[in-house]
Amino acid sequence: MTDVLNKHIPYLYKYRSLVNKEYVFDILKNHCLYFPTRSGLNDPLEGVIQPIHFHTLGSTYFIENGYLQPEFNELLEEYRILSLSRTWNNMQMWAHYANNYKGICIAFKYNDVFLNAREVKYTSKRFKYIDERDIVTDKEFESIIKKNLLYKSKNWKYEYEYRIIEKTSEPFFYFPQNCIEEVIFGNILEIDRETVVEISKICNEQNIKLSYITFCTDYFEIKKESFSLYLYLNDEYNPYISNDVIMYEGQEYPIRTHFIGSDRIIESRK
């Protein structure tokens, strides 16, 4: 399998919702990602492959109707899978995994802790391993399981997924603080203002770059711009609000101007 370094991919990305923002704070403050087992993933066909017969292990570990036998399912549950993507600007990923653009996307450097990430293969057929020998060693069997977990249906191809697969009981994947390169906000007009401020302060303390996405005017694409907490707090990112001042009896009064269609509504901000 090809690793991230050999593919010259500088970053891997994790899309997260902010519905339970404490999970995001766990990533940013405690430098850990949830490390689920197969049953914690959202594809019911994870690990379900074509029948393989091992004479020394009984008749077969797989039944013909496509479901895993309980014994093999227990073996799969000993492994944990960290799912990442190689792209930050995937509109489907923002919709599915970042609460319809109201979440964030975190960029991780591919330093040592992520070098075991492997590219997922998308296919119309299930992974098939055939071995005509009577004996398969534990090491070979572990290799079969890991390869199996790197094959997914073509329906998931848009994820451009990379995975780290480890046999462990540890429910969290820990990484050094300097692994996080950037946090990209989704639609900041729809994200809770307090949450934006909290995340911004954490990132500023750790010298993590901040960006936010915008939508292209000519194409069905998204792009990103540098994010400034100062400008955000002064509503500079809101296209429907401009900040001005008016003179009244020799004094300046700050106002907020809303543009709704062709109308201009002025309200005092003092």
Image: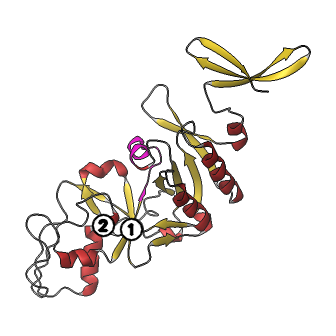
Question: Which color scheme is applied?
Answer: secondary structure
Let me know if residue 252 is in the magenta part: no
The amino acid marked with disc number 1 is Pro
Disc number at residue 39? Answer: 2
**Residue furthest right as drawn:** 250
Residue under the point 34% across and 75% down: 79
Placement of the N terminus among the 4 image quadrants: bottom left
Relative to 81, is 260 above or below?
above
Q: Nearer the viewer, residue 124 or 234?
A: 234
The span picked out in magenta is 84-96
Residue at x 29%, y 59% (from the top left corner): 121
Q: Amino acid at mark 2?
A: Ser
Rounded to the nearest angstrom, the CA distance separating label 1 from label 2 is 8 Å
Which element is circle 2 on?
Answer: helix
Image side of residue 147 versus residue 236, left or right:
left
Task: Determine which quarter of the picture holds residue 58.
Answer: bottom left
Magenta stretch: residue 94 in it?
yes
Q: Quadrant of the C terminus?
A: top right
1 and 2 marks in contact (CB < 8 Å) = yes
- For residue 133, what is the image quadrant? bottom left
Up/down of 184 relative to 238, above or below: below
Residue occupied by mark 1: 36
Residue at the image position 90 percent from the left and 13 percent from the top:
249
Q: Is residue 165 left or right of residue 211?
A: left
In the rendered structure, find residue 63 and report the number of the disc placed on it.
none
- Residue at the image position 38 percent from the left and 47 percent from the top: 96
